[in-house]
Amino acid sequence: MNEQSATLAIAADEELEARRKKRRILMIVGAVLVLALVVFGLSRIGGNASDSPAAAGAQRAGQAARVTVIVPGASDVARTITASGSLEARRDQPVGVSGQGGRVVSVLAEPGDWVRQGQLLAQIERSVQSQEAAQIRANVAAAQADAALAKNELDRAKALEERGFVSKADIDRKQAAYDAANARVRVNQAQLGATNARIAQLDVRAPTSGLILDRNVEVGQVVSAGTPMLFRMARGGEMEMRAKLSQQDLNRVSVGMPVEVTPVGSDKVFTGTIWQVSPVIDPQNRQGEVRIAIPYDEAIRPGGFAEARISGGVTSAPLLPQSAVLADAAGNYVYIVNDNDEVERRNVTVGRVDDEGVTIAAGIDGTERVVSRAGSFLAEGRKVDPVREAAAQE
């Protein structure tokens, strides 16, 4: 039994050792595979940068790397200026208290309501003013009665004067009394008119026809001429977008140019028109404001944000693939290959970017050999082996 147990133990040890060897072999094979994948990936990156494994090998050997270049020439591209800005009422009208004010007894308009010019928006309590007006009307009636009495006395005196019973002096006194009575009538009537005008000012009315944007008053609130606006409205419902443009783009736009406006969060595109171009440039950011008139729509909400596309006609400029344009902290740039087949960095100004490629507004004129796929392996002054590729539009 001891010999049999020993034999079994030896067999178990041998089996365990075999499993350990197998595990070590699998680990080594796995490491080799990972290393092979890393080497393959590096070779692919080198291949993409130099366009062939042979060029990658030449690069490792210190030879010139092969790169693909493109001579873009000049293409006719649509000049489109993009901008963003806020949506506003074209004429934002505050509505407040024009008189002495008082306690609000009714509010008759809500945000989103369309109102006509002169329409009643809110009423202010007027009991005291009404009593004053009643008192002045009574004074007017009394003054008119005094004037009528003075008129009758003057007429009788004139009739008696012809018979010699009344002197000229008496006639003059009665004429003066009559004139004074008429003057008192006019004074009271003027006071009544002023009181009625003050009462009318207790009605808050729409200054023009338009859309109510905001309401800042409630029933029971005490308001006066110093109270901030009670309502805010857009005259005629007219809306606009206020976009900021660079000084360069501002020189390319003019009043009357069509603009496509898309509010943020909406898929609707509205056709607007530039109605004002700022005559000044902000010295802080070197930008100017363009105001774009937009027809009213429920999607146009003042205070919101929108994107604008201004069509500026057609211009001739180099068109590059997006892979050719790089960017860093200094801005956008491309790599070009000079007459000595050496790499040079060229800073550029990017214009329009779309599916066709990148329009270069400044920096190159289209006659340069531009590296079409500029990899991170390139550096200024490096010798390369350029292979020309046909331009997309040449």
Image (cartoon, rainbow, N blue to C red):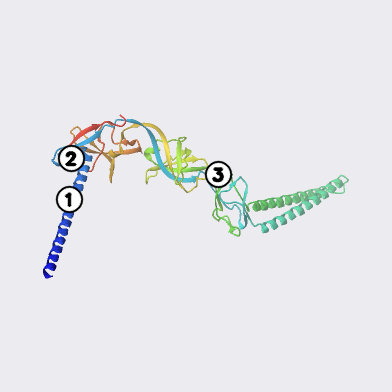
Front disc: 2 or 3: 2
Front disc: 2 or 1: 1
- Amino acid on which disc 3 is placed: Arg
For residue 162, above or below residue 228: above
The N terminus lies in which quarter of the figure?
bottom left
Q: Estimate the x, y position of residue 377 in percent, counting from the top left.
A: 21, 42
Instruction: Return the residue nearer the eye: 82 or 118.
Output: 82
For residue 359, above or below residue 25: above
Q: Residue at x 67, y 53 (%)?
A: 195
Residue beneath label 1, please?
32
Is disc 1 surrounded by few (<14), some (14 to 19) or many (20+) residues within 10 Å?
few
For residue 363, above or below residue 117: above
Residue beneath label 2, please?
56
**Mark 2 residue element:** helix
Q: Is residue 369 visible?
A: no
Instruction: Return the residue nearer the eye: 295 or 254.
Output: 295
For residue 14, above or below residue 51: below
Task: For marks 2 and 3, give the CA distance.
Answer: 69 Å
Residue beneath label 3, please?
235
Q: Earlier in the sequence, mark 3 or mark 1?
A: 1
Q: Residue at x 41, y 34 (%)?
A: 312
Instruction: Return the residue nearer the eye: 236 or 248.
Output: 236
**Mark 3 residue element:** strand
Specify the quadrant of the image occupied by residue 388.
Answer: top left
Q: Give the left or right position of residue 362, taking residue 258 as reference.
A: left
Specify the quadrant of the image occupied by residue 41.
Answer: top left
Task: For marks 2 and 1, give the CA distance.
Answer: 22 Å
Q: Estimate the x, y position of residue 52 in percent, counting from the top left.
A: 20, 37
The C terminus lies in which quarter of the figure?
top left
Instruction: Return the residue nearer the eye: 50 or 194.
Output: 50
- Amino acid on which disc 2 is placed: Ala
- Amino acid on which disc 1 is placed: Val
